[in-house]
Image (spheres, rainbow, N blue to C red):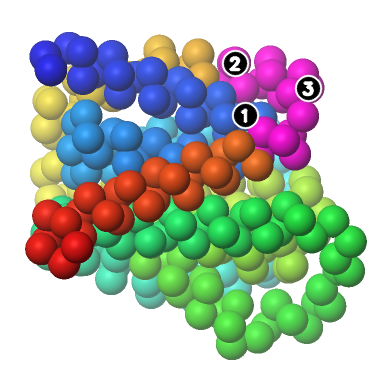
Amino acid sequence: MSDWLKLVLSGTVILITNAIEGVTGFGSTVIALPFLNFTIGLHDAVQVLCFFGWLVPIYIVSRSWKHIKWNELGRILLYCAPGVPIGMFLFDALPAEILCAILGLFMIYVSISGWQGMKCTTCMPVPAVAKKSKLLKLFLFCGGIIQGAFGTGGPFIVIYATKALPDKSLFRVTLSLLWLTINSSRMAIWAVKGELSNPHLWKLILICLPFWAAGILLGDYLHHRVSERNFKYGVYALLGISGVVMLANNLYKLGLF
């Protein structure tokens, strides 16, 4: 496969996954990662997706910053932030096969929990005190680790945020500032390490930028024309299948399967 074909396929993946996020409100990074791993490699994929995951929150926060729930943002950062450097260390220290196997497990978990959440149409709201449970704090810490390693710890953090921030507007802008904060810190660390001065990275970003913009516009167009519930079922199914394939493939490479 030629380098340009790999770049076009990468851009197409970014277009489709950002269109999915435009319809469903989640999923662009975690769905795109396994496919970009095959086209441009895990390291480049994480950095490119982190950059694009940094652009959208800037727009959202600049428009709705007055609605940020600062106390909840502080609580999330308190438990999430310690996990970020651990995730970044694991990303640099572990072989790609182990990282991809972990990512496959993570995708399977998100798929299963997503299907369970979609089926729960009559669930009662969780009392506010539940957001202080040790289990939810553990989810935040795990979300920080996954965010540090792959730039996509959102599903763990969302488990907490759906209980602490039931209002969708407060939920959206508060988490957008969280992603902006975490991704900015990761990019700052990469800048100190000299990784952001890599011309190859900016070549990838510039080539994929039009695809990303087209995906955002397409997702916005489809948002009011596609059944969000049915679309989410499809996304979770795709996520689970991709996770199983990625996990099995990398366990085989490690000689464990």
Q: Position of residue 177 (x, y in %)?
A: 56, 50
Residue type, mark 3 in image: His
> Are discs 2 and 3 less than 8 Å apart at CB?
no
Q: Nearer the viewer, residue 29 or 85?
A: 29
User: Mark 1 sits on what residue?
Assistant: 22
Disc 1 or 2, which lies upstream in sequence? 1
Horizontal and vertical percent for residue 109?
49, 62
Q: Is residue 239 magenta?
A: no
Type of amino acid at the residue the image marks with label 1: Gly
Give the residue at x 60% y 61%.
Answer: 113
Q: Which residues are magenta?
A: 216-232
Q: Amino acid at mark 2?
A: Leu
Between the residue at mark 1 and the residue at mark 2, the CA separation in whole angstroms equals 8 Å
Question: Is most of the magenta stretch helix, strand or loop?
Answer: helix
> In which quarter of the view is residue 163 placed?
bottom right
Quickly name the residue at label 2: 218
232 left or right, relative to 2: right
Residue at label 3? 224
| Up/down of 193 relative to 196, above or below | below
Q: Is residue 220 magenta?
A: yes
Q: Please tell me which of labels 2 and 3 falls first in the chain.
A: 2
User: Residue 8 at what x, y percent from top left?
Assistant: 28, 14
- Residue for point 51% across, 19% down: 215
Q: Are marks 1 and 2 in contact (CB under 8 Å)?
A: yes
- Name the foreground residue: 5 vs 251: 251
- Picture layout, residue 84 above or below residue 108: below
Q: CA distance from mark 1 to mark 3?
A: 10 Å
Q: Look at the image and tell me whether residue 13 can be seen.
A: yes
